[in-house]
Image: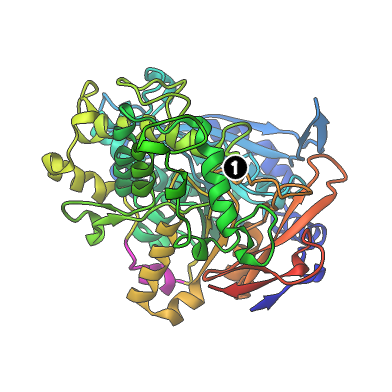
Amino acid sequence: MTNFSSRALPRAGLALLALSLSACTTIPNADRLATSCASLTRHVIAPGAIGLPSGKASVTSAVLTTASAATVNNGTYVPALPQFCKVNGTIASRDPAAQAINFQLNLPISWNGKALQYGGGGFNGVLITGLTPLRDAAPDDPLPIARGYATFGQDSGHQAAAFPPGEPGAFALNEEMLENFAFASYKKVKDVAVDIMRTYYERQPQRMYYFGISEGGREGLTMAQRFPADYDGIVSIVPVINWTGLFHAFIRNQIPQHDDWLQAGKASLIAKATSDTCDALDGLADGVVNNYMGCQTRVDLQPLRCPGGRDAGLHCLSDAELRLLRDIHSPYVFPFPIANGLTTYPQWLYGHEDSLDGPSAVSLVRWVSGAAAPATPPDASRNSTQWIYGSNWIRYAIARDKDYDVRRYRPENFRAQVQKTSALMDSTNPDLSAFFARGGKLILRENAADRAQSPLMGIQYHDALVARLGAAAVERSVRLYVSPGSTHTGNSRAVAAGPEVPTMVDLLDPLDRWVNSGAAPASALVQVIKGPLPPFAVQATRPMCRYPAYPHYVRGDRMQASSYECRHF
């Protein structure tokens, strides 16, 4: 077990100063970089210089952007930006019917010699600029570009605005666009970014990192598995690695609700039952289920059954609702193997069903029930994200028919296409030996209250790494942390008294230290919650424990990390 004290808190200011000083001395000829930015607009990368079959890449604009100080604009904190060259460009498709890949690369004048590729989210289709805060960063954490990183992102080779509203999967009808979304665009853009960096800085980056969340987390693991020589370190948060299993579980969860909808107003009823059962298992009844694994076998929703089993209002659960909840908390089983021999997708965890996932969306409602029963075709304004995403994937990627009635779907009738898309999409290969052999480091984070994807999938992948490569190899190269009470987007529920559960933590600096100095991240990292505006007062701290441990309350102020220890299940 691990004890915590305030000394475990990161000294972000000192770290930023050190990074800034090193960045300012890495590239001496700042004047040349500033004046040569515009010349990149003539830069073209031939297809042969890109590591996968591709059209040519062209820079469409390169603009020197002046440094800007941090400010508060209309009540929102806007972080500082350094002087940098903002490069936008495209990678042409091979298929004339396919859309181009759009990318943005940001080249700081004071470069630290490293590059960070941002991952996407959902079905992608929007340009990732590489200029946004990292997921779960504290408001005063410097942007990666402000730490000296060259940063870049892409749209994965399709533009969502070109397709009808509520149809984010429509791009998948085109084979090249589907392949770009699955893996190819991230490799192509990385190769193009390195070529441009080599031209601009007159040398290539010393380190290459990938930082992704959800779909972006899948992308990061895909890079480690498919292109292990390209990256030195990867952060993968709530990764959708078993894409095929997840989207089939979505459909399993949604089809019964066409006739027997899990009413949105019942999220609080379910959450109270799980909290009453599990909250105190971590030593403290504060509204947070820290002992998320110990909770699962204890929850029994049967006492909430409506008399006679028929729906009787928001105070009880019908037999149909109880069946659905049993399904959600049971593995989805395929009738045949998918990529890497998998035949199941793990169940979701109980707890925090009524927590917010996003600014105003209750987690269970956003992902599972929606504001209304699933409609055919989907109602993008009222249906759950599981139904919108799941039905899109089945219609466009599996059935290859936008008008297909997903209510009739049976995977065994589409076995070949399911297995084909699984081979493209799923980043479940546990053989990371090539990535580890070059010194690659991987930080995984799962959020225990995630209803978009099951946190057990990342845990199972970690276990598969150990089974395939051995505990010693995984110890040298992988860290898996789990954040209790955190939903898919990093939001958390409020404790009984005080602020929300801390979820903010910087994972880029620990990754960089691990890669460069060999100093592995601690067995627990301190999560914080801070005020959104200067002086960014720390409101609470709590440990995020390395799996298989959870934060168990011991004594003292429950808003302080030092009051907890990481205890194994």
Corner quadrant of residue 68? top right
**What stretch of residues is rendered in magenta?**
429-438
In the image, is residue 432 part of the stretch drawn in magenta? Answer: yes
Q: Secondary structure at mark 1?
A: loop
- Residue 21 lies in the magenta-colored region: no
Q: Quadrant of residue 375?
A: top left
Q: Is residue 548 above or below residue 113?
A: below
Q: Nearer the viewer, residue 385 or 496?
A: 496
**At 51% from the left edge and 35% from the top edge, which residue is drawn?**
266
In the rendered image, the quadrant that contains the N terminus is bottom right
Which residue corresponds to the image point at 82% horizontal and 62% vertical from the top-left? 14
Q: Position of residue 377 (x, y in %)?
A: 31, 20
Q: Is residue 469 left or right of residue 544?
A: left
Which image quadrant is residue 46 in?
top left
Which residue is more in the foreground, 362 or 137?
A: 362
Left or right: 341 in relation to 24: left
Instruction: Work out whether residue 508 or residue 105 is closer to the camera in this orientation and state it.
Output: 508
Q: Residue 346 in the image: x percent, y percent?
A: 36, 56
Point out residue 63 in the picture as x, y percentages from the top left corner. 63, 30
Vertical relation: 492 (above or below) 307: below
Give the amino acid type for the residue marked by disc 1 in the picture: Ser
Observer-nearest of 137 and 210: 137
Tell me if 471 is positioned left or right of 415 in this view.
Answer: right
Q: Is residue 326 above or below residue 235?
A: above
**Rendered position, 330 above or below 184:** below
Q: Residue at x 30, y 49 (%)?
A: 245
* Residue to which mark 1 is pinned: 355
Residue 327 visible in the snapshot: yes
